Image: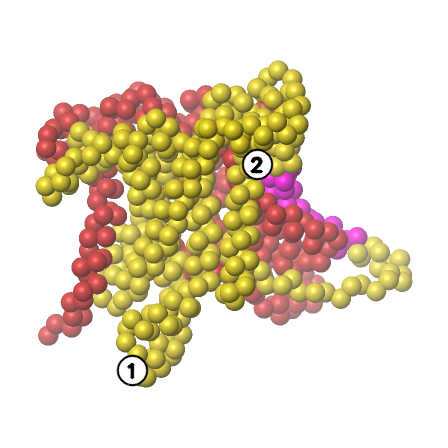
Amino acid sequence: MRRRLPFSPWHLLLMPLALIFVLPLVQMVLTSFMTTQEINQFPPRFIPTSIHLEGYRTLLAESHIVRWFANTVLVSAIAVVSHLVLCSLAGYGFARLKFAGRGVAFLAIVATVMIPIQLLMIPTYLMFARAGIVDTLAAAFVPWLASAFGIFLMRQFFLGLPVELEEAARLDGCGALRTFVSVVLPLARPALATLAVFTLLSSWNDLLWPLVAISDDTKYTLQVGLASFQGTRRTEWSQLMAGNVIATMPLIVAFLVAQRRFIATMTFTGLKG
Amino acid sequence: MALTFAATPRTHQDVAPRARGRRGRALRRNLTGWGFAGPATLLVVGLSLFPAVWAFFISRTKWNGIAPATGVGWRNYERIVQDPDAAAAAQHTLVLTVLFVPGSILLGMLIAVALNQKIRLIGFYRTCIFVPYVASAAATGILASFVFNPQFGAANEALRRLGLPAQQFLENPAQALLVICLIALWGEVGFCAVVYLAALQDIPKELVEAAVVDGASRWRVFRHITLPELRPVTVFTAIWQTITAMQLFDLIYTTTRGGPMNSTQTVVYYIYELAFQTQRLGYGAAVAYLLFAVTMLLTLGVIWYSRRSGSEAF
C-alpha cells in the first residue's frame, strides 16, 4: 500500500535546477579536501580520492583565519544584539508613543533608505578617521548598530498588534518601558527573529565597508580576509575553498537548522509587498 | 522596502495647555518618546543623512584626502560627461541591470510556481534553491572563479562532455560581464523565489477554484488570476533587484576586479577605485552622487508607474 503522489512533470524542471544551485557548493566542500595535485588533474575530478586536510592546515597555519572568524562573530553578534534592542525600541516609539518631532524623525529615516552605500563610504570613512576608529573593529560594527530597515520592520509589526493589552498594562500602572518589556516584547518574537536573521546575514556577509575601513590584516573580517587571500594566492585552490567553507558553512548550517522558521519569517515580514 | 506603511494613526492634537501640569506631562511624554526612538534615529540619520550632505560638498572639490581640498564648483560633474571610463562603467552597469532584473524576476517567478506544487521532494528542492542566497557574494565570487576557470573548471568540463567548445569565461572581455550576471542570478534568485512563493500562497484559493469550475485552463488561470495578483510583488522585486544589480560590488571584486580590459568595471566599482585606490575623493563623490540620482529617479519612476497602473506596493 504505497500512498505516493504521482510523478509530476515539474520534477523535470526542478531536479536540474536544484542540482545547478547546489552542486557548486558541494564542489566547494569537496575541493577543500583535495590536494593541489588532484585539483589540477585533467579531466577535473569531482570527488577527492581521500580526505586531505592540507588546505585547512595551511590556511590555519599561514593566515589569520581564526582571528578573522572571531572578528566576524564579534561584529555580527554586536550587530544583531544592537539591532534587536535599538530597532525594537525605536519601532515601538514610532508606532505607539506620541512625541514632538516624531513625524520629522520618521521622515528622515525613510529618506535614508534610498541613499546608496557608495555615496556614504567616502564621508563615513573621513568621519571614522577623525573619530580615530578607522582600522579598528569598531569601524566594522558601528554602521551595523541600527538600520532604517530594522526600524520599519519593528514599527510595522507593532502597528499590527492590538492595543488592548498595552492599555490594560497601562491601567495597572505600568510605565512605557515596563509595558514594552513585559507585555509587548514577548509578543514580538517572530519579528525579532526575522530582524536577527536579516542582520546576521548582512553583517556576516558584508565586504565593501570593512574592506574600505580596515587595513590591518589582524582586524579583517572573514569576507575581507578571504578576498585578500584570493588576491595573493590565486592558485592555492584547496586553501581558498577551505576558507570559503569556513566563511560560508556557519550560516548555511544555521539556515538548514532554522529553515522552516526562516522562510516563514521571510513571508511574514511583508517583504512580499 | 515594501513594508507597507500603515498610516500613522492621527492623534488628536492636544488642546492648548491649560494647566501647568499639562506641560510637565507633555515634556515627560516627549522625553519618553525620544528615549525610545532617539538612539536608533540618531545612529541611522547620523550615519546616512549627515554623510550624504557632506558627500555633496566633497563632490565639489578636488581632494586626495590629505592635502587641503580645493573647491572646483561643478567641474567634477562636467568632467563625468566627457569621461570615457565613466561612460563605459555606466554602460556595463546598464547591461548588467537589463539582464539581471528581468532574468531574476522571470526565473524567480517560474521557480516559485514550480515550488508551489504539491509534489514529492519539494522541501528538498526549496532548500537547494535557497541555499546560495545565504552564501556571501564574496565566497560566491571565489567559488565562481574556480568553477569558471578555463583550464580545470567544472563549467568547461560540462561543455566538453556536451561536445561544445571550451570558453574563456571570466578571462574573455566579451563574456565576462555575462558570466558575472549568471553568477549573480545564481546567488540572488533564491530571494525572488521566496518572495514570489510567499505571494503565491497568499492568493485566495476560492479565486482559483472558481475559475477552474468555470472551465478555465491552467494557463488561463495563471494569466488572468495569478499574474495580476503577483503584480505588487513584481514591483517590489523589480526595485529591489535593480538596486542589487546597480550596487553589485563583492562579486566583481572577488572575480575580475573590473577586468579583463575593464569589461566588468561598473559604476560602483569605478567609485571604489576612484576614492580608495587612486584617492580622487572629490571626483569619486561626484560619480556616486550621479549614481544616487539615477537610482532615485528609477525607483520613483517604478513607484509612479505602479501607482498609476493601480497596483500599489508602496
What secondary structure is found at the residue carrying circle 2? helix
Q: Colour of chain B?
A: yellow
Q: Residues within 10 Å of mark 1 (few under 14, many from 20)?
A: few
Q: Reading the chain from its start, which is encountered first: label 2 or label 1?
A: 1
Say whether residue A5 is left or right of residue A95.
left
Give the chain of mark 2: B
In terms of image quadrants, where is residue A121? top right
What secondary structure is found at the residue carrying circle 1? loop
Q: Nearer the viewer, residue B268 or A168?
A: B268
Q: Nearer the viewer, residue B117 or B102?
A: B102
Question: Which region shows up in magenta?
Answer: B27-50
Tag 1: residue type? Gly
Residue at 37% across, 28% down: B262
Residue A68 in the image: x percent, y percent?
39, 29
Q: Which residue is mark 2?
A: B289
Residue B245 in the image: x percent, y percent?
42, 43
Q: Nearer the viewer, residue A89 or B44?
A: B44
Residue at 52% across, 39% down: B291
Residue B91 in the image: x percent, y percent?
42, 37
Residue at 15% across, 27% down: A40
Q: Which residue is mark 1?
A: B215
Q: How is the image coloured?
A: by chain
Tell me the CA gap for discs 2 and 1: 54 Å
